[in-house]
Image (cartoon, helix red, strand yellow):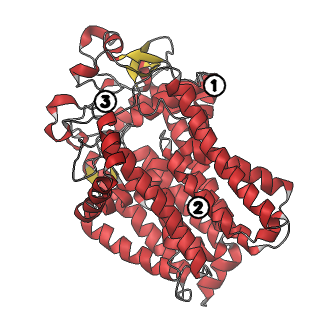
């Protein structure tokens, strides 16, 4: 270990790592033009709604909401109605101040936001725009309206504080993005402290542009990514002790089960890492299994309970290609949730064949959207060479991440990640893919970021590499610079 490595270790590598994470997070927050991120207007609307104490999103018919748009020509921040058949279906809706989302920040599904350049003058104008909370507009938020309030807790608190301090619309927007970044940073820092042997791997996963951009936004992914990273690291760290669970640990496991359910129900498989903890910590095998079953059941009941509260009792229509894209998109014709369910129930091999085909054919897209894909409609990708180079780097750090795992522990981690992956493909096969389609449509690479610590952590086979902290710092810095350069060249 050279002098510089010694100084880094003495000071605390995780402190330097998180400082770099926050630095690049703040830079991308203020340089990415507002709402040049997929579905961010819908996330903003849901977070704002929660900040006003509206925890259950109201429902409305598409036609009724569209009639409220001023003049009939103004772009709506919400879901765009393209399916005449779905015009009268009930969907989640929100009402927010017009000043939060200026017209020039809104883009339709056919628009390429890279064609519209952003300037410093527009940034200053947005920052100085008064909020005017009484001038409002309604919009449909069928995908984000179903999210529970804890998913937007940092941004909702920031919005409430911003209103209380009479901040401008732009100041509130950036305060909400900053709150998401701070929450994610706290979770990443906690994960590195809990699992120091894998801190370089955790840091490099967090420094991926996709992680940083989502964290520094009003998106629910800021909380989802943070909770999943922290939860994974904590469960793995609990393997190292033989003492009985403390009350704080029991309470923490209960909160984790609830938060994972609030993030996305498919990430509940992270709780399977509980079964890697020594059984004596629960006071014997029976208590260990009983408590493990209890937290899994709590996670499931939280998901089902919220779904029943928000959907089952309101007759709201699920967000699918049927009620969004409509007949203008031939590749999404014949999307039928009920028919697809029947097909999968009778011929499950059809789904698994479609999933396999998608993983093979779409491997480069999943890789590219895992590392970085933004713009209002997700048309901005990082350079292909960066994705390949960063994949190789991550694999090296994964193979030498320092986790000492048994074969059973590796298998459990990969099994948990595999179950979540299958669940994602199944959900999108039902809601976004034509009946009997040979490929699954709608899956994006960023969905797998919360599973990355389990997948890459399970690959630990080699001794830790030399100068790993220095190499990680250099790699993280390079990743951040490429992210900022790609963003600048696309939007300025």
Residue pictured at 29% horizontal, 26% vertical: 80
Question: Which residue bears the numbered disc 1?
Answer: 165
SS for tag 1?
Answer: loop
Q: Quadrant of the N terminus?
A: bottom right
Separation of residues labelled 1 and 2 (CA atoms):
28 Å
Q: Which of marks 3 and 2 is nearer the N terminus?
A: 2
- The nearer-to-camera label among 1 and 3 is 3
Give the numbered dot on residue 106: 3
Position of residue 311 measured from the top left corner of the image (x, y, whole percent): 49, 26
Q: Is residue 187 visible?
A: yes
Quick one: 233 or 179, which is closer to the camera? 233
Q: In this view, does 481 lie to the left or right of 353?
A: right
Quick one: 30 or 436, which is closer to the camera? 436
Residue pictured at 77% horizontal, 69% vertical: 279
Q: Is residue 387 left or right of residue 54?
A: left
Quick one: 355 or 69, which is closer to the camera? 355
Q: Work out whether 421 lies above or below 311.
A: below
Q: Is residue 492 visible?
A: no
SS for tag 3?
Answer: loop
Give the numbered dot on residue 19: 2
Q: Residues within 10 Å of mark 1 (few under 14, many from 20)?
A: few
For the residues labelled 1 and 2, say whether their Cβ atoms are less than 8 Å apart: no
Q: Which of marks 1 and 3 is nearer the N terminus?
A: 3
Residue pictured at 49% horizontal, 71% vertical: 456
């Amino acid at each position: 270990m050279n002098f510089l490595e010694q100084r880094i270790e003495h000071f605390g590598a995780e402190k330097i790592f998180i400082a770099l994470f926050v630095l690049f997070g703040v830079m991308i927050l203020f340089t990415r033009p507002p709402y040049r991120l997929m579905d961010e207007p819908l996330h903003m609307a849901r977070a704002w709604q929660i900040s006003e104490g509206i925890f259950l999103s109201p429902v409305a018919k598409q036609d009724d909401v569209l009639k409220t748009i001023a003049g009939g020509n103004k772009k709506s921040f919400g879901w765009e109605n393209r399916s005449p058949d779905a015009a009268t279906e009930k969907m989640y809706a929100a009402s927010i101040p017009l000043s939060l989302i200026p017209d020039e920040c809104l883009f339709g599904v056919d628009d390429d936001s890279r064609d519209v350049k952003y300037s410093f003058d527009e940034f200053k104008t947005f920052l100085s725009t008064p909020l005017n909370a009484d001038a409002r507009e309604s919009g449909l938020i069928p995908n984000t309206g179903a999210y529970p309030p804890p998913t937007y807790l940092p941004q909702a608190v920031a919005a409430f504080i911003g209103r209380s301090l009479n901040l401008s619309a732009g100041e509130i927007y950036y305060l909400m993005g900053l709150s998401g970044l701070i929450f994610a940073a706290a979770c990443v820092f906690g994960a590195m402290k809990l699992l120091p042997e894998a801190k370089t791997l955790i840091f490099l996963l967090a420094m991926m542009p996709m992680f940083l951009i989502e964290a520094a936004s009003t998106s629910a992914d800021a909380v989802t990514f943070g909770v999943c990273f922290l939860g994974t690291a904590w469960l793995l760290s609990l393997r190292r002790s033989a003492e009985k669970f403390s009350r704080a640990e029991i309470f923490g496991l209960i909160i984790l089960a609830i938060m994972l359910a609030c993030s996305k129900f498919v990430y509940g498989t992270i709780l399977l890492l509980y079964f890697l903890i020594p059984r004596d910590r629960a006071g014997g095998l029976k208590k260990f299994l009983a408590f493990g079953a209890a937290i899994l059941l709590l996670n499931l009941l939280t998901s089902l309970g919220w779904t029943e509260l928000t959907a089952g009792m309101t007759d709201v229509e699920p967000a699918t290609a049927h009620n969004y894209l409509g007949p203008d998109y031939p590749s999404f014709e014949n999307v039928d949730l009920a028919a697809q369910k029947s097909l999968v129930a009778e011929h499950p091999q059809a789904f698994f064949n479609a999933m396999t085909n998608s993983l093979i054919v779409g491997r480069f897209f999943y890789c590219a959207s895992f590392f970085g894909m933004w713009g209002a409609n997700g048309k901005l990708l990082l350079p292909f060479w960066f994705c390949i180079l960063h994949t190789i780097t991550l694999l090296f750090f994964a193979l030498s991440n320092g986790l000492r795992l048994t074969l059973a522990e590796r298998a459990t981690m990969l099994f948990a990640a595999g179950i979540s992956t299958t669940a994602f493909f199944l959900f999108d096969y039902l809601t976004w893919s034509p009946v009997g389609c040979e490929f699954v449509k709608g899956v994006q690479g960023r969905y797998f970021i919360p599973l990355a610590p389990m997948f890459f952590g399970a690959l630990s086979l080699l001794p830790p590499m030399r100068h790993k902290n220095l190499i990680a710092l250099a790699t993280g810095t390079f990743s951040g610079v490429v992210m900022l350069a790609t963003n600048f060249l696309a939007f300025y």
